[in-house]
Amino acid sequence: MHQPNSPPPTAVVAEYTKLAAHYDRRWSRYVEASTAATLARVTRPSDGCVLDLGCGTGVLLQKLAHRFPQAKLVGVDSTAAMLAIARQRLPPRALLHLACAEQLPFADDSFDLVVSSSMFHYLPRPLAALAEVRRVLKPQGKLVLSDWCSDFLTCRVYAHWLRCRNHAHVKTYRTQELHDLLATAGFQFIRV
């Protein structure tokens, strides 16, 4: 497991180090639904390189491994405890890195596809993270980002609850806000 020089955000690390052992059981329904929503937007990466940003315990990467048996799979998360669980569930060909979204340990134009499920609301510097994703994506690469949307009352209520209980939570975005962030980071052909 690669460990870059920069430390990840402490609130996220502290929260998910505590949750790691019980995360899959506690959040299984939500993880299955969000993983399915993300996968529904993924097209075949033609055996290319796929990055799961905020891979957590590796549920999405595991499904991607089955769906794309020839693809090179890479996962990044800021919490070592989550990556340890991911390592147990994933095939050896999946590479895991302990890193922050704002400083990815990869060369420019490395990935055909970047996926991220339920992680964006934890980013203290979303533009920096999106700029990094843009940097590591190949010119014709695709980003599939799934997260809560504060356009919906249920998500706003849950986001309020999270702000009170989970110090790692930063912000849940409206559709237009996310679109604007993606455009500012240089993404084109944006569908939100």
Image (tube, grey):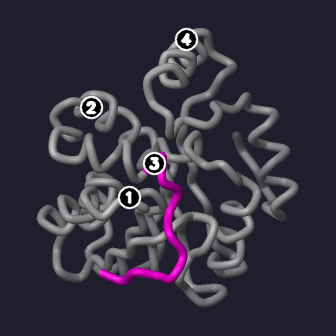
Residue at 76% from the left image edge and 50% from the top image edge: 190
Could you tell which of marks 3 and 1 lies nearer the N-terminus? 3
**Which quadrant is the N terminus positioned in?**
bottom left
Which residue has dot 1 on it?
55
Q: Which residues are magenta?
A: 1-12
Q: Which amino acid, mark 1?
A: Cys
Which residue has dot 3 on it?
12
Residue 27 is tagged as 2
Q: Secondary structure at mark 2?
A: loop
Which residue has dot 4 on it?
157
Could you tell which of marks 1 and 2 lies nearer the N-terminus? 2
Q: Secondary structure at mark 3?
A: helix
The Cα–Cα distance between marks 4 and 3, rounded to whole angstroms, is 21 Å
Q: Dots 4 and 3: beta carbons under 8 Å?
A: no
Residue at 16% from the left image edge and 74% from the top image edge: 91
Q: Secondary structure at mark 4?
A: helix
Q: Disc 2 vs disc 3: which is toward the camera?
A: 3
Label 1 neighbourhood size at 10 Å, few (<14), some (14-19), many (20+)? many
Residue at 67% from the left image edge and 71% from the top image edge: 132
Could you tell which of marks 1 and 4 lies nearer the N-terminus? 1
Residue at 55% from the left image edge and 22% from the top image edge: 159
The Cα–Cα distance between marks 3 and 1, rounded to whole angstroms, is 13 Å
